[in-house]
Amino acid sequence: MNIWALDKDESIKAVLLVLGDRLGIDRLKLSPRQDLDPRAVRLEKPGDPMICAYLYTYGQDEGRCGIHLEFPQFDESDISSSTDVHENVAINPLVDMLQVHFDLTDPPLMTTTATARQ
């Protein structure tokens, strides 16, 4: 994911840079179901697009973001999903939430911001 090439607001790019460094740049991907707001992205785990997270900076205090952790329903007759909503989340709890949500329990490969720009 080339964060610098995204047509997104600097506030969400800053969050994505930190997440890339802390969780591993290639361990999450941008969902093709993108929203039009430049301050928001939808992330998903590669290979498992049913578990995703909607991440946004609009309406949040500076340096914080909102997140909707989206879970699929396991009843095949139910096509909806359930969502766990968190507002004004600081970066450290955000990293922890995403690590658990996407089951990223093993440490990421070393990633640097310079690598993310390539």
Image: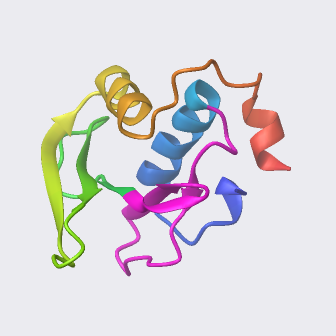
| Residue at image point 39% right, 36% down | 98
Instruction: Return the x and y of residue 102 as percentages of the image width and height.
Output: 44, 40
Left/right of residue 80 with respect to residue 31 in the rendered view: left
Instruction: Return the x and y of residue 27 as percentages of the image width and height.
Output: 63, 42
Up the image or down, 3 lies above or below 21; here it is below
Q: Give the quadrant of residue 47.
A: bottom right
| Residue at image point 15% right, 48% down | 84
Instruction: Confirm whether the magenta stretch covers residue 96.
Output: no
| Residue at image point 86% right, 50% down | 118
Q: Please name the colour scheme applied to the rendered image.
A: rainbow
Total marks in image: 0
Q: Residue furthest front?
A: 76
Q: Give the quadrant of residue 114.
A: top right
Instruction: Confirm whether the magenta stretch covers residue 38.
Output: yes
Instruction: Return the x and y of residue 36 as percentages of the image width and height.
Output: 38, 81
Quadrant for the N terminus in the image: bottom right
Left/right of residue 92 with respect to residue 81 in the rendered view: right
Up the image or down, 43 lies above or below 102; here it is below
| Residue at image point 27% right, 27% down | 90
Q: Give the quadrant of residue 81.
A: bottom left
Up the image or down, 10 lies above or below 76; here it is above
Up the image or down, 74 lies above or below 76; here it is above
Left/right of residue 79 with respect to residue 37 in the rendered view: left
Q: Which residues are magenta?
A: 24-51
Pick the front one: 2 or 95: 95
Pick the front one: 53 or 16: 53
